[in-house]
Image (cartoon, grey):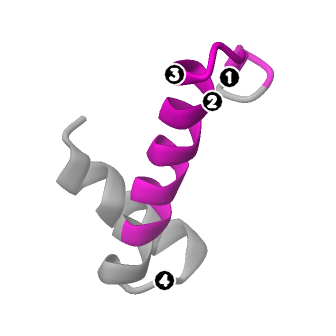
Amino acid sequence: MTKKQLVEKMAEKASLTKADAERALDAFVSAISEELAAGGRCPVNRRLFP
């Protein structure tokens, strides 16, 4: 799945504009990246992504 496809799916599922969905995805990725860069953990597992 490409970023474009993911943004489109997020927009559809959450009734967002594609622009809003892309901003949400970018914020999500940024938050995880910052946490990992600071030495933190971001456990993403099957409960979150079945």
The first of marks 3 and 1 along the sequence is: 3
Mark 3 and mark 2 in contact? Answer it, CB < 8 Å. yes
Spot occupied by residue 24 in the image (x, y as percentages of width and height): 49, 65
Looking at the picture, tell me which residue is in the foreground, 49 or 32. 32
- Residue 37's label in the rendered image is 3
Q: Which residue is mark 2?
A: 35
**Measured Cα–Cα span from mark 3 to mark 2:** 5 Å
Q: Which residue is mark 4?
A: 16
Quadrant in the picture for the N terminus: top left
Q: Secondary structure at mark 1?
A: loop
Spot occupied by residue 19 in the image (x, y as percentages of width and height): 31, 81
Spot occupied by residue 15 in the image (x, y as percentages of width and height): 54, 83
Q: Secondary structure at mark 3?
A: helix
The first of marks 3 and 4 along the sequence is: 4
Q: Is residue 33 above or below residue 8?
A: above
Three-letter amino acid code at the position of disc 2: Glu
**Measured Cα–Cα span from mark 1 to mark 2:** 23 Å
Q: Which residue is mark 1?
A: 50
Along the horizontal axis of the image, is 16 left or right of 5?
A: right
Per the rendered image, the range of residues in magenta is 23-47
Spot occupied by residue 29 in the image (x, y as percentages of width and height): 46, 42
Task: Say which quarter of the image contains residue 39.
Answer: top right
Mark 3 and mark 1 in contact? Answer it, CB < 8 Å. no
* Residue visible at 69% across and 21% down in the picture: 42
